[in-house]
Image (spheres, rainbow, N blue to C red):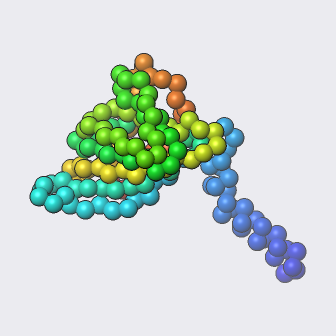
Amino acid sequence: MTRRSIAGLGTAFLMVLTAPALQAREPGAPPKVAAQHIETKPLAGEPGKEIDIQVYTFPPRSAVPWHIHKDAVEIEYGLAGTLMIEEQGKPPYALEAGKTNILAPNVVHRGWNPSATDPVKIYVVRIKPAGAPLATLVDGPKEASNAPDASAYPEEEKPNAAP
């Protein structure tokens, strides 16, 4: 084989490996929100409950779809940027860096980063039934605001997430 054909095979191999990444960046597709799992532990003194901790990074103009945390309390702390949160039947509100928000169990809600340039990062603690999905996707209400479309909710990739 010549160097030219080896280089050609290498280029073809690289194209096959990177094709999924290229497809994920189609023009007009919203960026994906990233979830970093920190820890899951049993909740002391509460049999059948656990604490799950995650850090979410919302790239500019990214969003998560309508969902609930079944029988779970969600405590959010803004690390960077401003996240817009909308609960069913309420106007959207901002979670800014250094501020907290607490969502009651089973609240239909969604979140998005309205910035075109700056990412949002939030620290999330959930107190939930042990082994239960972190989130369950639901249909959004008809009276919702005009938030950006969500590309994919990070929990969809986790083994204990709802379909």
- The picture quadrant where one finds residue 116 is top right
Q: Percent from the top left, x then y, of residue 114?
A: 56, 35
Residue 132's place in the image compared with 41, above or below, is above
- The picture quadrant where one finds residue 142 is top left
Residue at x-position 52% and y-position 29%:
147
Q: Quadrant of the C terminus?
A: top left
In the picture provided, is 155 more to the left or to the right than 13? left
Is 62 in front, or is 67? 62
The count of marks equals: 0
Is 29 in front, or is 83? 83
Q: Residue furthest top?
A: 143
Residue at x-position 67% and y-position 44%:
26
Q: Percent from the top left, x then y, of residue 123?
A: 40, 52
Q: Percent from the top left, x then y, of residue 54?
A: 39, 55
In the picture provided, is 50 more to the left or to the right than 160? left
Q: Percent from the top left, x then y, of residue 19?
A: 67, 56
Is 9 in front, or is 53? 53
Residue at x-position 44% and y-position 28%:
92
In the picture provided, is 152 more to the left or to the right than 90? right
Residue 91's place in the image compared with 154, above or below, is above
Residue 136's place in the image compared with 121, above or below, is above
Q: Quadrant of the N terminus?
A: bottom right
- The picture quadrant where one finds residue 11 is bottom right
User: Can I make out residue 99 in this image?
Assistant: yes
User: Can I make out residue 111 in this image?
Assistant: no
